Image (spheres, rainbow, N blue to C red):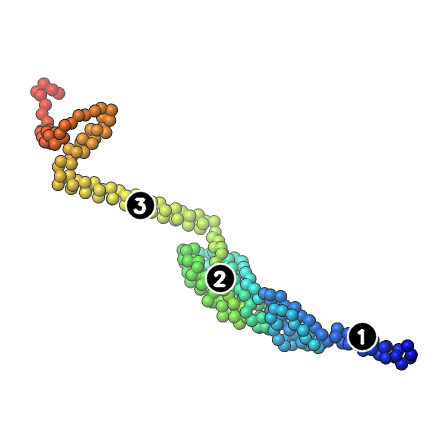
Amino acid sequence: MNIEQIVILIGAIAVVLAGQAIRASYRHEFIVSDGFTGLLFHEGRLVTTLAAGRHVRWGKTYRLALIDTRKTLLQVAGQEVLSADNVGVKLSVVLTTQIVDAAKSVQAADNHVAHIYSATQTAVRSVVAGVTMEALLTQRVAIGTQLRELIAAQAEAVGVQIHVVEVRDVMLPGDLRKAFSEVLKAKQEGQAALERARSESAALRNLANAARLIESHPTLVTLRFLQTLEASDAGRTFVMNDISALIPALNARSAKPSTSEPGEA
């Protein structure tokens, strides 16, 4: 190998090494996982958003920020508020949120979670102040819907969608818990008494119907008497050839006035 060939070989190696150095410096490969959106910044400026997959860019000073766009739960801890009837209560709320505009979520607010948290606290105070304590305990779904309507616009301003707002816990002072328990117990006892009264009324109606039936058909009294006699003398045997001959006698006996002998007490 002469000097010229050696020079050519060295030049080729230098070109390859230079190409690799340029490739390493200027070629950037980014991987975005499912459930995330990539925000690509170039020299500190947002240039595009990247969907899930593999992306290649050429140049310098690129930076990728991954934003989680899956649904997440945001729990707003209980804060003490006053209801419409001036009852102090602690209310905790759980929100199901999802980032729908990744760029807005980082550009519109420095912390979109804190922004939504504060908006939720304000909405809770506003809604609870307009309802009574009883409505707060029995209408949680409706109250959650009202909260969502109040929070949705402010969440949208930072690129977040509110799917569901759920009133999780309603915490009362000890004396109020006892009072509400007693009220609930009284309601249940009243319901039980009402059911007993309805049963008694039904029984009285049945007796009245039976009395009218007996009045229209007097022979039913005789048949009922025979049934009672059979039940009381289950161990005995009665032989009756013709029950129709016995019915007039029993009717006459029941119609005959009771008399006592002069010597009987």
Q: Amino acid at mark 3?
A: Glu
**Residue 169, position in %: x, y?**
49, 55
Residue at 64 percent across and 73 percent down: it is 40
| 180 relative to 121, above or below | above
Chain-order first, disc 3 or disc 1: 1
Horizontal arrangement in the rendering, residue 118 relative to residue 56 (left or right): left
Q: Residues within 10 Å of mark 2 (few under 14, many from 20)?
A: many
Horizontal arrangement in the rendering, residue 126 relative to residue 38 (left or right): left
Report which residue position mark 2 lands on: 165
Residue lying at the far bottom of the rendered structure: 4
Q: Nearer the viewer, residue 181 or 164?
A: 164
Tell me the tag on residue 17.
Answer: 1
Tell me the tag on residue 62.
Answer: none
Residue at 18 percent across and 40 percent down: it is 210
Tell me, yes or no, whether the two marked residues, 2 and 1, touch with CB atoms within 8 Å. Answer: no
Residue at 22 percent across and 43 percent down: it is 205
Chain-order first, disc 2 or disc 3: 2
Report which residue position mark 3 lands on: 195
- Answer whether residue 207 is visible to the viewer in this image: yes
**Residue 98, position in %: x, y?**
54, 65
Chain-order first, disc 2 or disc 1: 1
| 109 relative to 215, above or below | below
Residue lying at the far front of the rendered structure: 1
